[in-house]
Each structure stands twice: as C-alpha cells, then as structure tokens.
Image (cartoon, rainbow, N blue to C red):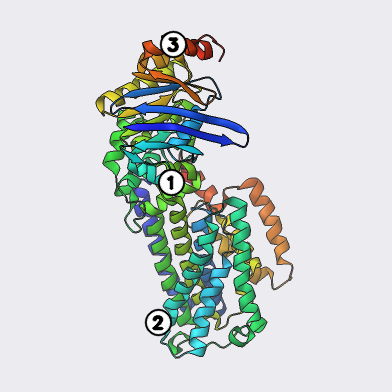
Amino acid sequence: MLRVENIYKSFGNFLAVSGAQLTVGRGELVAVIGPNGAGKTTLFNLITGQLKPDRGKVVFKEEDITRLSTHLICRKGIARSFQIANVFPRMTVFGNVQVSVLSQQRQSNSLFRPASTMAVKETEEILESVGLIAKAYELAGSLSHGDQRILEIAIALGNEPELLILDEPTAGMSPEETRITMDLVRRLAETKGLTILFCEHDMDVVFNVAQSIMVMHHGRTIVQGAPDEVRRNEQVQEAYLGDEDA
Amino acid sequence: MVKPGSSLRSFWICAAILVVLLFLPPVIPRFYTYILASIFVTSLLAMSLNMVVGYGGMFQFHHAAFYGVGAYTFGLLLTKTHLPMLVAFIAGPIAAALAGLLIGWFCVRLIKLYFAMLQISLGSLLWAIAFRWYSLTGGDDGMHGIPTPSFLFSSTHAYYFILIVFSACLFLMYLILKSPFGMTLQAIRDNPDRCEAVGVNVRRHQLIGIIIATFFAGVAGVLFVVLEHSVFPDLLFWILSLEIFIMCLLGGWFTFIGPVIGAAIMVSLRTFVGIYTQYWTLILGVLLIFLIFFLPEGIMGFISAKFSSKPGEGIERAVE
C-alpha cells in the first residue's frame, strides 16, 4: 500500500535520512524503531509532506506522492499524529475532531451553514471509539498529556484515513497510559481494518503489537521483517538491541 | 458549544438593543446620534480586523488601508461618475476585497512578523497612492462634500442607514464565524501545521479569510463617507490601523462583540476627553496599562469568563 524507495534528506551537512526503505501492506501494523536521532520522525515527515526529500520516492497505492503538498497527501488517505501533542488548544475536544471531519467531508469552505449542526454524528462516533466522549466539551488545551495524545489520534481518525501514521504515540506516557493507547491502536487496526504505521521507543510495545518491524540506524534502513526475524538479525542487535540505553 | 438557552438569550438581548437603537434618534440630541453612527462605523472596521487577527491569527497590521480603499472608491465613483448610488455602494467593498486579495496573496506566503511587515509596507503603498495622486484623489486634502444621495443627507437618515447596514454585516460575520469556514479559520490560528495535516489548504483558507474581512472593512469605509461626506488619506494611514488594533485589544480578541466595546470606548474618549485636551491618548495609555495587567483577555473576555461556570469556558464560548 505504501512504499518508500531509497529516500534521502539532509539538513545542512547532517544526513537525517539516507537511503531509507519501507513497505507497508494493506491492513498491516508496521513499526519503525531505532535509537534517538535515527531519523524516524524525519521519515514520517517525508511521507506526509511536511518535508520534501532530496532524493527517493514515496508511493502510495501505486501513485507517486513524493512532491504533493501536505493537505493533498492527507486527502489521498494518509492521516497522522505528531510526536509532540499537536492539538487545537483553544477549541473543545469535540471541535478538534469536528474540524478534521469537516475537512474530510470537503465542508471547510462552507460559509453560511452553522457548523454546530454539521458532522456531529461522525465526530461523536470517533470520540466514542477512542474513549474521549465524556470530555467532549472540555478545552483541548486543558486535557492531560495522555488525553491530548489520544485526541491526536482522534483528529487523525476524522480524516477516515486508509493509512494511519502515529509518531511515537506513547511518548511521555505512564506505563498504564501506554497500555491503554496500544490497546486502542490494536483495536483500531482490527475493527476498522486500518493500516497503521507507527514508530516507538519502547521495545516491548513494538514486539508485542507490530506485524512487521523496520529498524533504522543513522538514517539508514538496516532491515525490515517480522518481529522474530528482526530480533535475530545481528546488525540490529549490534546497533540497537544490545545497547539498552539507546 | 453554547448551551441552547444561552444562544436564545443572546438573541433577545441583541433584538432589544436593536429596538432601543432604532428609537433613540428622536429622543437624543443630534450630536449623540452622530457619535453613535460613528461608533457603528468604527466598530464594523474593528470587527473586520478581529476576524483576521483574533479569529484568524494573522498579523494584519495595516487593516485600515482597506477601509480607505472602500471609502475612496465610493467617494470617487460618486464624485467623478454618474453611476447610481447602489453601484458605488457595492463597488467600494469589492474594491477593498480586491486590494485584500492582491496584498493577501503575497502575505499568506509568510508568517507572523514577516506577514505583518509585508502587510504594513504594501498597505502603506495604498496610502502613498491616495496621498500623492493629487489629480485623482485630492492628495493630502482629500475630497470633501461628496454628493451622497439626498435621502442620506439628514444625519438621522444616515444614522438609520448605517445602523441597518451595520446590523446586517454583524449578522453575516456571525454566520461566517460559526460556519465550518470560521471554525477551520480558528483551527488554523491555533495550529496551522496540524490543520494542513488534516487536509486543509491553509494558505487558501487564510486568503479567503482576508478577502472576507477586507470586504467588510470596505463596507465600513463606505459608511464613513455616508456619515462624513468626505475622504482623506488619514483613512489609510497606519496610525488608524494601530487604533483599531487597540480597540480589539480593549474589547477582547477572542470575543465576537469585543471590538464594538473597544470602538465605543475609543470613539467616546476621543470625543469627550478630546474636548478638554488634545492629549486624550494619555488616558488611553493608562487605560491600556491597566487592561494588560488586569484584563489580559479584554473586557468582553473578562465578562464571558466571569459568567461561565468553568474556567476557560468563557473564552471557549466566545470562540464558538
């Protein structure tokens, strides 16, 4: 469904991503792992168009989306969450999700209809499915960090994506919150048939959930394969698994 | 989300205020009708600014330029052509919106302070044209005794005309800010990057916001001419832009009605304190210092926060 072919991106003299490869099949739950600074977030930004690669290609559903701008990539069916909580703080939780549902329905430019009557059912369904419905009318900026991260996912769901990209969905979360979030991710993959690509620090989380794992190191792809295969790979052990502090 | 009861209540409050305003002219002195009309015109300008700054989060620092464009277009068409009043009336705001499109097209490519700087310089260009093109605009003298239609000559009629157009514009702005468009505009203000990632064409959305706001600024410009029968380059000068900025600050950025309060305060200060001293801005300055320390959300922001049960909800209600 998604193919990243030999992609490069440098910032000044620093090669953030140098020759990364990634394949995501329809319905798969794919994880990208790698030590800090391995280029995981940059890779995601390259896929969703926040950054443009120096070289290489991003192919989604057999279509080259490398040079498309961010909002057009989103409309192709790729939605994402961000590593740092990235919500609309002055709006309600409900409004946060509603904005993305309205965008999905191509209603963002509708000028004279009251927004309060639009996309209500869809928005409520999403909030229900992620467990934020009780907080629907609180200001997004006043939510706890964990809830803001969940809201992030809910906003992404508003776009009815085929591919959902989550950039470290559990960053900064307590073990309990991490468990809840990963359960949610797994449930979304199962019930909605979503294809999910995420990156993660926590090794246990990754090996429990992911069906395919891509390991990055210094901006390069070391290997992509099933969890067992990755665990046995010598290079991976050297680069990442052996070094518990990473 | 406003509770159903409270939106009905605000509707009745608005209706009551409108009725009072309709019956005021016969009972109050002519001078006060003039001041009120002047407040309406200034309020409309300040609210159109608030649409881009408070709701849109764009640093439109030279908004008065479009007010001037509306006023000059209306004035020039009435003076130099024999077009019907209606055509001139519509042409004013459209010219302002076109200027908004032209300037905004460049500005939305930049952010924050860079947006502001470009906007000030391009807006000042419009001022320079009005100031220098003597043969057309009358230069620094401007144009006086603009022949507005006879039915608007009496100040009472002008008052009613301005009140009706002002109310209609307020209603339209309210609809727009509550619409998906307005909601998305506020989302862009809060977080443009996130908005782009949910599939919103941020630049185009901001540009449309600027065009709408400059259109309303143009309406305010036309109403100014209806009230004063004259135009002069000060209408496009950056000092006026600063003044309407302060009005929004006084009233409250994130509230719909705030700029009206701010405009009322500024116009009254200038009129009534201005009688005693030309340094009325001194009082304004002191007022602003107190405001920044004690009511950082502006007067309306403070009121709506006070009358809502939960902290923060007041702001939210205003944003909605």
Disc 1 target residue: A69
Disc 3 target residue: A233
Disc 2 target residue: B86
* Identity, as a three-letter code, of the amino acid under mark 3: Asn
Q: Is residue B195 left or right of residue A191?
A: right
Q: Is residue A3 above or below residue B40?
A: above
Total numbered labels placed on residues in the image: 3
Closer to the chain start, of discs 1 and 3, is 1
| Residue B169 location (% of width, % of height) | 42, 67
| Residue A25 location (% of width, % of height) | 31, 27
Pick whichever, B8 or A80, lies toward us. A80
* Identity, as a three-letter code, of the amino acid under mark 1: Ser
Q: Where residue A210 is drawn, which disc sits there?
A: none
Q: CA distance from mark 1 to mark 2?
A: 43 Å
Chain identifier of the residue bearing label 2 in the image: B
* Identity, as a three-letter code, of the amino acid under mark 2: Leu
Marks 1 and 3: same chain?
yes
| Residue B46 location (% of width, % of height) | 54, 63
Query: Would you say residue B154 is visible in this rendering?
Result: no
